[in-house]
Image (cartoon, grey):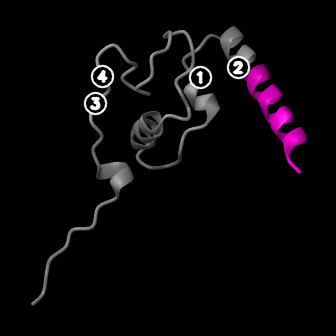
Amino acid sequence: MATNVKVINMALEGTLLPPKEGLCQQCATDHDPALPHNQQSMFWQYWFYRSVNGARWPTWDDAMAHCTPEMQEKWKTALAEVLAKQAKEKP
Protein backbone atom coordinates (compact mmCIF):
# COMPACT_ATOMS: atom_id res chain seq x y z
CA MET A 1 0.00 0.00 0.00
CA ALA A 2 1.56 3.28 -1.11
CA THR A 3 1.31 6.28 1.17
CA ASN A 4 1.56 9.82 -0.01
CA VAL A 5 3.72 11.76 2.40
CA LYS A 6 4.21 15.48 1.99
CA VAL A 7 7.67 16.55 3.04
CA ILE A 8 7.95 20.19 4.10
CA ASN A 9 10.81 22.45 5.00
CA MET A 10 9.97 23.28 8.62
CA ALA A 11 12.13 26.40 8.57
CA LEU A 12 10.15 27.88 5.67
CA GLU A 13 6.74 26.21 5.99
CA GLY A 14 6.45 25.32 9.68
CA THR A 15 4.49 27.46 12.08
CA LEU A 16 5.41 28.90 15.46
CA LEU A 17 2.77 30.26 17.79
CA PRO A 18 2.78 34.06 17.77
CA PRO A 19 4.71 35.85 20.53
CA LYS A 20 2.86 36.82 23.68
CA GLU A 21 1.28 40.27 23.55
CA GLY A 22 3.71 42.94 24.71
CA LEU A 23 6.78 41.09 23.39
CA CYS A 24 8.67 42.00 20.25
CA GLN A 25 6.74 40.35 17.43
CA GLN A 26 9.93 39.54 15.55
CA CYS A 27 12.07 37.96 18.27
CA ALA A 28 9.52 37.20 21.02
CA THR A 29 11.65 39.01 23.61
CA ASP A 30 10.86 41.92 25.90
CA HIS A 31 13.31 44.59 24.73
CA ASP A 32 13.34 48.29 24.09
CA PRO A 33 12.66 48.89 20.37
CA ALA A 34 15.92 50.88 20.21
CA LEU A 35 17.89 47.74 21.13
CA PRO A 36 18.75 44.83 18.82
CA HIS A 37 16.49 41.84 18.45
CA ASN A 38 17.52 38.77 20.43
CA GLN A 39 19.73 37.08 17.84
CA GLN A 40 19.74 33.89 19.91
CA SER A 41 15.94 33.64 19.91
CA MET A 42 14.61 30.74 17.85
CA PHE A 43 11.63 32.94 16.99
CA TRP A 44 13.92 35.67 15.56
CA GLN A 45 16.01 33.16 13.64
CA TYR A 46 12.97 31.61 11.97
CA TRP A 47 11.31 35.01 11.38
CA PHE A 48 14.45 36.30 9.67
CA TYR A 49 15.09 33.08 7.69
CA ARG A 50 11.60 33.28 6.25
CA SER A 51 11.92 37.01 5.53
CA VAL A 52 14.84 36.27 3.17
CA ASN A 53 13.13 33.19 1.67
CA GLY A 54 15.61 30.80 3.23
CA ALA A 55 18.66 32.49 1.74
CA ARG A 56 20.55 32.52 5.06
CA TRP A 57 20.26 32.54 8.83
CA PRO A 58 20.54 35.86 10.71
CA THR A 59 23.65 37.38 12.24
CA TRP A 60 24.03 39.93 15.01
CA ASP A 61 24.37 42.56 12.28
CA ASP A 62 20.88 41.62 11.09
CA ALA A 63 19.51 41.74 14.64
CA MET A 64 20.78 45.29 15.10
CA ALA A 65 20.17 46.60 11.57
CA HIS A 66 17.26 48.78 12.77
CA CYS A 67 19.37 50.40 15.53
CA THR A 68 21.14 53.74 15.37
CA PRO A 69 24.81 53.68 14.32
CA GLU A 70 25.77 54.56 17.91
CA MET A 71 23.79 51.64 19.34
CA GLN A 72 25.25 49.30 16.73
CA GLU A 73 28.77 50.37 17.70
CA LYS A 74 28.08 49.78 21.40
CA TRP A 75 26.77 46.28 20.66
CA LYS A 76 29.66 45.42 18.33
CA THR A 77 32.13 46.48 21.03
CA ALA A 78 30.33 44.44 23.69
CA LEU A 79 30.09 41.37 21.43
CA ALA A 80 33.81 41.63 20.60
CA GLU A 81 34.61 41.72 24.34
CA VAL A 82 32.51 38.60 24.96
CA LEU A 83 34.20 36.75 22.09
CA ALA A 84 37.65 37.76 23.34
CA LYS A 85 36.79 36.53 26.85
CA GLN A 86 35.47 33.23 25.48
CA ALA A 87 38.62 32.75 23.40
CA LYS A 88 40.79 33.17 26.51
CA GLU A 89 38.71 30.65 28.45
CA LYS A 90 39.03 27.88 25.85
CA PRO A 91 41.57 25.22 26.82
2 or 1: mark nearer the eye: 2
Residue designated by label 2: 75
Query: Cβ–Cβ below 8 Å for labels 2 and 1?
Result: yes
- Residue 26 at what x, y percent from top left? 40, 26
Q: Tell me how far mark 2 sits from mark 1, CA to CA.
A: 8 Å
- Disc marking residue 64: 1
What amino acid type is highlighted by mark number 2?
Trp
Check disc 2: other Cα within 10 Å, few if <14, some if 14-19, many if 20+.
some
- Disc marking residue 53: none
Is residue 86 part of the magenta span, yes or no? Answer: yes
Upstream in the sequence, badge 2 or badge 4?
4
Bounds of the magenta segment: 75-91
What amino acid type is highlighted by mark number 1?
Met
4 or 1: mark nearer the eye: 4
SS under mark 2:
helix
Residue designated by label 3: 18
